[in-house]
Amino acid sequence: MTVAGPTPAASVAPAATVPAKSGITIPDIAAGTNAAIAKSKLEALGLTNVELSSANPDYSNVFLPKNWTVVSIEPTPGSQVQASDPVIVKVTKP
């Protein structure tokens, strides 16, 4: 009868760490900011999919952003997004 000795521990390579994708942080743009300025600030950060959307159901299109003001931003300020992720700026006419 053969007695087996302790089995050597298998050498396990440490798990490779995947670097986290660096994102763009949505800034806190105050309500009441001119929509054209807000859109320019977001695009200057490298965001490529910024959409202005009317917060008022009576208006379906935003033609002249300089005539509109910011109500809110989706995703919320502080969120991390990729450059091509959609960012929706809800706006209203003053």
Image: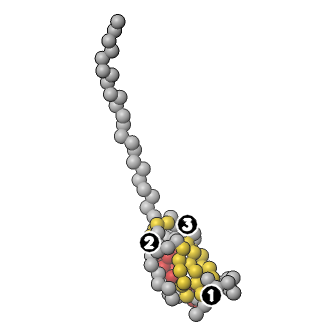
Q: Tell me how far mark 2 sits from mark 3, CA to CA.
A: 15 Å
Residue beneath label 1, please? 64
- Give me the disc on residue 38: none
User: Which x, y percent locates residue 82?
Assistant: 50, 64
- Seen at 62% across and 87% down, the residue is 64
Give the label, 2 or 1, closer to the camera: 2
Left or right: where 21 falls relative to 65: left
Q: Is residue 19 above or below residue 12?
A: below
Numbered label tally: 3
- Name the image quarter holding residue 5: top left
Q: Are marks 2 and 1 in contact (CB under 8 Å)?
A: no
Q: Are marks 1 and 3 in contact (CB under 8 Å)?
A: no
Q: Is residue 7 above or below residue 32?
A: above
Taking the image as drawn, is residue 80 in sight? yes
Name the kind of residue labelled 1 in the image: Leu
Q: Earlier in the sequence, mark 2 or mark 3?
A: 2
Q: Earlier in the sequence, mark 2 or mark 1?
A: 1
Left or right: where 90 falls relative to 26: right
Q: Tell me how far mark 1 sits from mark 3, CA to CA.
A: 23 Å
Q: Is residue 20 above or below residue 93?
A: above
Q: Residue furthest top?
A: 1
Give the label, 1 or 3, closer to the camera: 3
Name the kind of residue labelled 3 in the image: Asp
| Element on which disc 3 rests | loop
- Give me the disc on residue 85: 3
User: Which x, y percent locates residue 38?
Assistant: 51, 82
Name the kind of residue labelled 2 in the image: Gly
Residue beneath label 2, please? 78
